[in-house]
């Protein structure tokens, strides 16, 4: 890893100003970075993918590691809340079960003990070209996406181009499904950003980044509103290797059922298939007013994958994700798939 | 190969044994030529029992010092600069900036030697320079400060590209073509003729990717040389005695002045012989800095430049008649060993085909050379032929086990197939692949292997009994994690009627008696006989001293058991007995005894898996491996070998494989994130079964045979479960889903 300056602020304001005042860098990947659990940042630094001039340690800031609220008031997660805290929290497990499942699905116990909510949302892509220092693709300032015509079994089937990464976060699809927002602090003060607007497609934002955060901005908190579907939420993740893996594909689902067991509203967000958490409104609409049965589940699954544009090696993600959509909705709705 | 026993004439002798807790003399048969014998396999006090590993505690507690843990005072950290190009000419290496970094103590570059002509790197990862510095971080910085000018040349990392007409050449030497013929056997025209008479014909291609050894400890050495006449090399190696010569050459010392130490090493699986390029660089750095250098490869280095199991690409045309007889088999076998030749057992492997023809080639690519890996060439050959046999059996509508028996002459295979089938519950299997309601389908499959093994005459062992009663056994051999320390002690303890804890072993040091390298499953079969011989000699030497105290009993008739020594109607405790020894104690010098080792084993594996046909997930349920092995020195260790073999083959079947980008010439998964080794959650129930019907009183290695048959067994189980035949490993969900899709389209 490249030598860097280490600073440990005591407040969010100080952290922001340390990010802002860092020496100017030639490349975005050399800009100062905040460090939370370090489970992603350190790996990118060790592989020289990021080479921050300054590392701003957030762990000395008090009060960012609290879980507050519940299913009635809504949930507030400090940016430094660990994934282990989320998966073990009794209130979250009861009122936002999908969120606890999503946290539990991440990596290993050791990584979840250290990895934080803020870091999870801001982690960098896992595309193996991105992770290979020698392969300088567009994401790293090169001129080509090697995955587009190369080994793309793990890449995107939606929203791709000119980079075909999939967003690696497991919390993100679930939090988008639950309608969460992030509170962000920067030199110009604070703002709240709905998570759905936080992530950017390669064709929309800077291709060197996966979200709207500026270099001197921090996530301080994630808020999840109370909703009629949070208690019926679930996260279904399919890993190639169960012991430890990112999602080949995943589905965050939440449903509100009426007394007649018909769907009042549904949220379906796909993970592992697009550069951002991929919400599928057509499938959500389709379910409105329908009972969750084999036919409606299959219909929703079909619509969810409509318009997918697989690359040469990832067409399998279509049937795989269809299955996950069916199974996730069935689980959320308490019926059999 | 066929079971081979040591040749022997027999005679009966009486030896002491504990029967129902009582010391008695039992009659056993031994060789009549005066040579040593183990005696019947079921009559041992310690051997052929379940012996916990003597180094287990230091290993799990972290106290064991591996090569990686060595920190001689004043030590520097070495790092290797790898070529980022798969094929390039090195024009210039400028290390001046690196040398100027404070803390950098030595830099060596491939271009240092003026005698050397131009350097052309032939794979991405090939070392072009190395540095030694006070910390690993400084060493990393120094690597990045070295400027290398390359002229990039066209590369080939795919076999298909390499065989194309007009493809660039892998090697510059015109005598080394991209495709090199290896072997050819049989008559192709006879096979073609016989295929016409077959009732069913299967034409199929099977592929296996390059597999990585993935040893827990990476390759490397700690070279302790500070100038002067002597050096010590701590090595992570499978051959203690392969190190001093290699190191001496680099250091410019006499071979006898270099000592190799291999106290504990973290696995090699065939990839760690000799000092390697990393060891040569460590020596050069140490020599330049006149300080010890710790150069262990990083995990990425390990993937890129430390060897691999060659990939394979095998094309078959085979036919059988209605009664299940394999009448013809035509095989074209490509070994994909990168710059190396690769390895692959010849087809039809263990099967008898009335007419068989094969031709074999090495296809070269710009990838690091393959090395030996646990049963080189066998899992590849076994996977392909076992898949093929399955395809023929299904096409004939014949039971897959019956079909195999029909085409295997050796009765040992028949009994092992029967035992494995019983254990897995073969009768429960899916009769029609893919049948059954619901998305979760169960399936079973089997596979078969064979291995040679055998021992050789290289181990010199000393067993010393001291006057204070302590017993030690010394030999320079290395323990790869296979349990060498444990059986070495056990053999001596059993011979002297003691417990394992009463014996201390010293191994892993080139100053001790010589020993062979651990390759080809030959360690136990070479070492154990020498240990036994030394122990027998030590016993007789002690007995000779005691004869006067035991009523003049003949030394051969003095018995050693239960911590006591008896003869002439008297019994002495071990301590009393040893007190009669001379001040220096007595030592037995053991050499290899042909009568104690055998060779030739079989091995059958059955697997049961569950396939989720809606996601393509394969969940291994159960694996059974049946293995003949002669005398199991330590049943626990043998079972552990078999478990390890099943796990490694499961990895090869379902998850592992190098992935290269053809355009960039780079490996995309040089780490444990994307090179997916199975973890705890992937483990099925593992049932290792020692085939005790093999009553050979001979030691035979079991490391390699246990990795061979399971790959095919798992692949066949997947097919039996879901009806998809995946002919290219690893069998990942994408291949199953796409296979199901194309089947549905076909139907
Ligand atoms: C082997 C392995 C497996 C993994 N598997 C998974 C998986 O299955 N699913 C998954 O979702 N993730 C996975 N991860 C990724 C990741 O490590 C974790 O998800 C973790 O939550 C990251 O959190 P962290 O606090 O450690 O982040 P850090 O590494 O500290 O930070 C990650 C990034 O976010 C930035 N950052 C951190 N906090 C903030 C903040 N408050 N505001 C703004 N930016 C911030 C950092 O600058 C950095 O760029 C895996 C990681 C490893 C090493
Ligand atoms: S998908 Fe993105 S990260 Fe991967 S190669 Fe293409 S540009 Fe690079």
Image (cartoon, coloured by chain):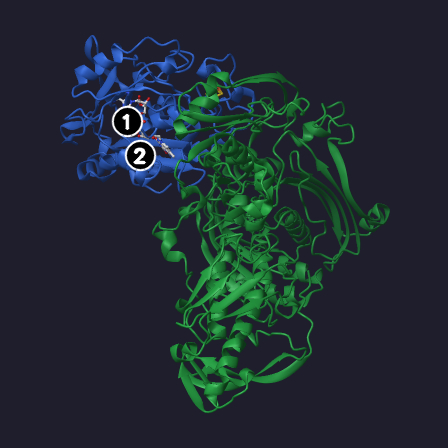
Rendered location of residue B149, percent (x, y): 58, 16
Report crowding for label 2: few under 14, some 14 to 19, many 20 or more residues within 10 A (C-alpha).
many
Q: Colour of chain A?
A: blue
Query: Along the line of sight, which residue is nearer the eye, B268 or A203?
Result: B268
Rendered location of residue B580, percent (x, y): 43, 79
In-image side of B654 versus B570 (left or right): right
Rendered location of residue A32, percent (x, y): 31, 15
Q: Colour of chain B?
A: green
Mark 1 residue CB less than 8 A from any atom of ligand 1: no
Parent chain of label 1? A
Query: Along the line of sight, which residue is nearer the eye, B335 or A2?
Result: A2
Q: Check contact, mark 1 vs mark 2: CB within 8 A.
A: yes
Q: Secondary structure at mark 2?
A: helix
Rendered location of residue B79, percent (x, y): 48, 30
Residue pointed to by mark 2 = A102
Report crowding for label 1: few under 14, some 14 to 19, many 20 or more residues within 10 A (C-alpha).
many
């Amino acid at each position: 890893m490249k030598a860097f300056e280490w600073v440990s602020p005591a407040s969010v304001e100080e952290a922001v100003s340390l990010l802002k005042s860092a020496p100017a860098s030639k490349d975005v990947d050399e800009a100062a970075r905040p460090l939370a659990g370090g489970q992603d940042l350190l790996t990118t630094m060790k592989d020289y993918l990021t080479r921050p001039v300054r590392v701003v340690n957030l762990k000395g800031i008090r009060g960012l590691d609290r879980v507050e609220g519940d299913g009635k008031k809504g949930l507030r997660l400090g940016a430094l809340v660990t994934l282990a805290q989320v998966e073990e929290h009794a209130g979250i497990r009861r009122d936002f079960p999908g969120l606890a499942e999503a946290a539990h699905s991440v990596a290993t116990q050791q990584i979840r003990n250290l990895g934080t909510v803020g870091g999870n949302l801001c982690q960098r892509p896992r595309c193996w070209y991105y992770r290979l220092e020698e392969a300088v693709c567009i994401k790293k300032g090169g001129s080509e996406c090697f995955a587009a015509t190369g080994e793309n079994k793990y890449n995107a089937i939606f929203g791709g181009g000119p980079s075909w990464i999939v967003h690696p976060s497991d919390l993100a699809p679930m939090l988008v499904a639950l309608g969460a927002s992030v509170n962000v602090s920067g030199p110009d003060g604070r703002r709240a950003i709905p998570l759905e607007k936080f992530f950017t497609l390669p064709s929309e934002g800077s291709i060197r980044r996966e979200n709207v955060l500026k270099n001197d901005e921090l996530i301080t908190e994630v808020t999840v509103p109370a909703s009629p579907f949070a208690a019926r939420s679930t996260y279904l993740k399919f890993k190639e290797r169960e012991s430890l893996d990112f999602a080949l594909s995943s589905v965050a689902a939440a449903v509100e059922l009426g007394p007649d067991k018909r769907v009042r509203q549904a949220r379906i967000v796909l993970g592992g298939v697009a550069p951002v958490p991929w919400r599928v409104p057509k499938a959500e609409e389709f379910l409105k007013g329908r009972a969750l049965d084999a036919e409606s589940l299959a219909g929703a699954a079909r619509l969810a994958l409509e318009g997918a544009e697989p690359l040469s090696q990832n067409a399998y993600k279509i049937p795989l994700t269809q299955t996950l959509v069916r199974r996730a909705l069935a689980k959320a709705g308490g019926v059999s798939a | 190969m066929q079971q081979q026993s040591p040749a022997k004439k027999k005679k009966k002798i009486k030896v002491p044994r504990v029967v129902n807790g009582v010391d008695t003399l039992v009659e056993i048969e031994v060789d009549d030529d005066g040579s040593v014998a183990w005696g019947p396999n079921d009559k041992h006090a310690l051997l052929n029992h379940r012996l916990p590993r003597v180094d287990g505690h230091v290993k799990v507690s972290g106290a064991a010092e591996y090569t990686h843990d060595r920190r001689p005072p004043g030590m520097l950290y070495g790092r290797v600069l790898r070529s980022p190009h798969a094929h390039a000419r090195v024009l210039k290496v400028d290390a001046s900036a690196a040398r100027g970094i404070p803390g950098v103590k030595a830099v060596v570059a491939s271009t240092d030697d003026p005698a050397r002509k131009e350097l052309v790197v032939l794979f991405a990862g090939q070392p072009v320079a190395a540095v030694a510095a006070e910390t690993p971080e400084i060493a990393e910085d120094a690597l990045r400060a070295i400027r290398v000018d390359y002229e990039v040349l066209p590369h080939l990392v795919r076999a298909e590209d390499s065989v194309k007409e007009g493809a660039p050449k892998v090697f510059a030497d015109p005598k080394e073509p991209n495709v090199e013929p290896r072997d050819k056997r049989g008559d192709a025209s006879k096979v073609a003729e016989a295929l016409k008479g077959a009732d069913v014909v299967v034409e199929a291609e099977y592929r296996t990717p390059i597999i990585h050894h993935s040893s827990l400890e990476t390759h490397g050495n700690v070279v302790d040389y500070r100038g002067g006449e002597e050096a010590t090399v701590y090595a992570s190696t499978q051959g203690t005695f392969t190190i001093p010569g290699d190191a001496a050459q680099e250091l410019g010392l006499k071979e006898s002045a270099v000592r190799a130490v291999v106290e504990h090493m973290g696995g090699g699986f065939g990839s760690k012989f000799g000092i390697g390029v990393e060891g040569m660089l460590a020596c050069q750095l140490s020599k330049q800095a006149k300080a010890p250098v710790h150069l262990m490869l990083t995990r990425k280095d390990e993937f890129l430049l430390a060897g691999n199991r060659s990939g394979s690409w095998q094309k078959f045309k085979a036919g059988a008649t209605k009664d299940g007889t394999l009448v013809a088999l035509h095989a074209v076998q490509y070994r994909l060993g990168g710059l190396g030749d690769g390895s692959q057992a010849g087809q039809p492997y263990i099967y008898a085909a009335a007419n068989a023809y094969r031709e074999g080639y090495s296809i070269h690519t710009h990838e690091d050379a393959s090395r030996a890996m646990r049963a080189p060439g066998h899992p590849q050959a076994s996977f392909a032929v076992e898949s093929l046999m399955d395809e023929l059996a299904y096409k004939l509508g014949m039971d897959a086990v019956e079909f195999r028996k029909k085409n295997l002459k050796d009765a040992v295979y028949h009994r092992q197939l029967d035992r494995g089938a019983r254990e897995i519950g073969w009768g429960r299997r899916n009769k029609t692949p893919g049948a059954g309601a619901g998305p979760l389908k169960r399936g079973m499959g089997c596979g078969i292997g064979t291995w040679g093994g055998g021992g050789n005459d290289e181990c010199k062992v000393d067993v010393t009994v001291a006057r204070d009663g302590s017993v030690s056994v010394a030999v320079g051999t290395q323990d790869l994690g296979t349990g060498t320390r444990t059986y070495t002690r056990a053999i001596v303890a059993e011979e002297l009627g003691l417990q394992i804890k009463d014996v201390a072993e010293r191994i892993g040091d080139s100053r001790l008696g010589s020993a062979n390298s651990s390759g080809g499953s030959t360690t136990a079969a070479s070492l154990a006989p020498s240990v036994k011989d030394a122990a027998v000699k030590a016993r007789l030497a002690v007995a000779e001293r005691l004869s006067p105290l035991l009523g003049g009993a003949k030394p051969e008739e003095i018995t050693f058991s239960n911590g006591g020594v008896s003869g002439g109607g008297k019994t002495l405790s071990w301590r009393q007995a040893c007190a009669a020894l001379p001040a220096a104690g007595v030592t037995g010098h053991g050499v290899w005894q042909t009568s104690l080792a055998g060779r030739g084993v079989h091995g059958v594996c059955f697997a049961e898996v569950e396939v989720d046909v809606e996601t393509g997930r394969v969940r291994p349920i159960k694996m059974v491996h049946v293995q003949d092995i002669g005398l199991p020195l330590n049943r626990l260790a043998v079972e552990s070998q078999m478990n390890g073999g099943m796990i490694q083959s499961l990895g090869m079947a379902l998850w592992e494989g190098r992935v290269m980008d053809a355009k960039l010439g780079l490996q995309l998964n040089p780490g444990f994130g994307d090179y997916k080794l199975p973890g705890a959650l992937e483990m099925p129930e593992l049932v290792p079964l020692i085939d005790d019907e093999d009553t050979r009183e001979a030691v035979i290695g079991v490391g390699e045979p246990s990795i061979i048959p399971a790959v095919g067994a798992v692949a066949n189980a997947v097919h039996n479960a879901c009806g998809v035949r995946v002919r290219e490993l690893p069998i990942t969900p994408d291949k199953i889903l796409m296979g199901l899709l194309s089947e549905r389209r076909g139907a």
